[in-house]
Image: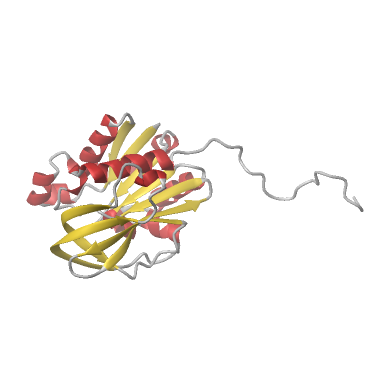
Amino acid sequence: MKVTVWNENRHEQTNKKVREVYPEGIHGTISAFLKEAGYETETATLEQPEHGLTEEVLNQTDVLIWWGHVAHHEVTDEIVSRVHQRVLDGMGLIVLHSGHFSKIFKSLMGTTCDLKWREANEKERLWVVAPGHPITEGIGEYIELEKEEMYGEHFDIPTPDELLFVSWFQGGEVFRSGCTFNRGKGKIFYFRPGHETYPTYYNEQIQRVIVNGVKWAAPVEREKPVYGNAKPLEEVPGE
């Protein structure tokens, strides 16, 4: 199983507070705990040639993790199309936090993926609403984060195939924070927590959810469906 962790890596270059929280970058922190969980991981960032997502890299990637925020518009349409096709072909995709507004997530959802937001150091409580799902394995009734950015409904996404987490924020809003989707042969998991100025990705329960998500999103081996004009399997009158 090979995991590629993609991060635009822009905040880490321009914001001292983010560098203090994630000295190895958000991608480095996520990659590190996935390696501890036994996964083979690589990282890729926006400034690399082809954003680090060459055909060779993507063809060898079983699950792609995506974190972006201020540079969504800088991701080229060519790379978005390349990732989109790999998802349809079976690569898993985990979209984190502000990646909800990335080109790749919006193209796979077919909606604006817009929402309410507020930065006010609020408590977030992520309630598990699918306790029997593999992604919530090992998680109690809820995950509590002392400080996080608020995302609030309405979240303009298609109705999820599965809803795993619903967040409550100290200011009163709620949000669908853990959602799964199927597109083609690929599986997608959107997971909300992870604002760049908070140490969210050091939280062991958040790490557990992402590790579980990688396992869940891994490709399933199956024969490629056959499309187009088809010969009948049985004798058909008039043939």
Residue 237 x, y percent position in the rendering:
91, 52
Residue at left 8%, top 51%? Answer: 17
Question: In which image quadrant can residue 223 be found?
Answer: top right
Specify whether residue 60 is in view. yes
Give the image location of residue 127, x and y in percent: 30, 57
Q: Along the horizontal axis of the image, is 147 left or right of 138?
A: left
Q: How is the image coloured?
A: secondary structure
Tell me where residue 46 appears, x and y as whole percent: 27, 46
The quadrant of the picture occupied by the N terminus is top left
Name the residue at 40% across, 43% down: 134
Q: Is residue 165 above or below residue 63?
A: below
Q: Which residue lies most toward the front here?
A: 141
Q: Does 56 sit left or right of 236 as displayed? A: left
Q: Nearer the viewer, residue 119 or 107?
A: 119
Q: Among all residues in the image, which is located at the extreme right? A: 238
- Asked whether residue 53 is in view, the answer is no
Quadrant position of residue 201: top left
Q: Locate residue 64, reporting x and y percent.
A: 37, 42
Q: Which residue occupies the foreground of this view, 18 or 54?
A: 18
Q: How many marks?
A: 0
